Amino acid sequence: MERTYVMLKPDAVKRKLVGEIISRIEKKGYNIVEMKTMYLNEELLKEHYAHLADKPFFPEIVQFMTSGPVIGMIVEGNDAVAGIRRLMGPTNWQEASPGTIRGDFANNMTENLIHGSDSVENAEIEIKRFFG
Ligand code: IDP
Ligand code: MG
């Protein structure tokens, strides 16, 4: 059993896609073991997206990710880290195949509905960051 950190972004909440996305995660067989609504601030985003903090589009990410509530989850299951990334589709929405969450619903580089940890190591760091 592996754990990963998943976060439904403000666009998923605004577009009422929370149920649709959670349904895909559950149908694939993963368990949602913790879930909560949060409002993120710039300081936390600088930590969570440290690898992007010096990019020219970082202010856009902050603007978007603070524009409304997000839903954070701990998701558990076999191969959960890579498996959730496959359900999400790649970062670039133009490369995301239909059938993936981003492939089906995203049409923008920033507003792409869902975050999932990119490694087992980062999953544990992110779970601590958001769930303590
Ligand atoms: P990931 O979400 O697929 O792991 P990361 O490279 O970690 O991708 O980027 C984090 C988030 O930052 C993306 O999901 C997206 O919202 C935003 N982002 C990444 N690259 C760009 C870009 O080139 N332009 C605008 N926003 C971006
Ligand atoms: Mg990432």
Image (cartoon, grey):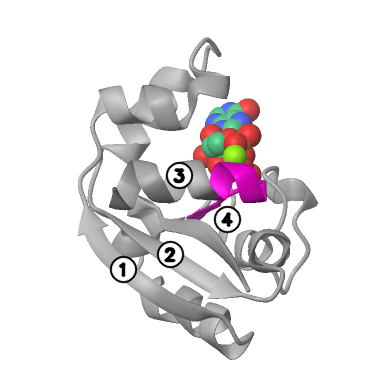
Instruction: Give the residue type at disc 2.
Output: Ile
Q: CA distance from mark 4 to mark 3?
A: 23 Å
Q: Position of residue 120 (x, y in %)?
A: 64, 51
The residue at which mark 2 appears reads as 74
105 falls in the magenta region: no
Q: Is mark 1 within 8 Å of ligand 1?
A: no
The residue at which mark 3 appears reads as 126
Q: CA distance from mark 3 to mark 1?
A: 14 Å
Query: For residue 61, which numbered disc appears in the image?
Result: none
**Element at badge 4?**
loop
Q: CA distance from mark 1 to mark 4?
A: 23 Å
Earlier residue among tags 2 and 1: 1
115 falls in the magenta region: yes
Q: Position of residue 90 (x, y in %)?
A: 72, 50
Earlier residue among tags 4 and 3: 4
Of circles 4 and 2, the one toward us is 2
Q: CA distance from mark 2 to mark 3?
A: 10 Å
Question: Can I make out residue 109 in this image?
Answer: no
The residue at which mark 4 appears reads as 106
Instruction: Give the residue type at disc 1.
Output: Met
Q: What's the magenta region? A: 113-123
The residue at which mark 1 appears reads as 35
Instruction: Give the residue type at disc 3.
Output: Glu
Q: Which residue lies at the image location 38% right of the left edge and 54% below the top edge?
A: 11
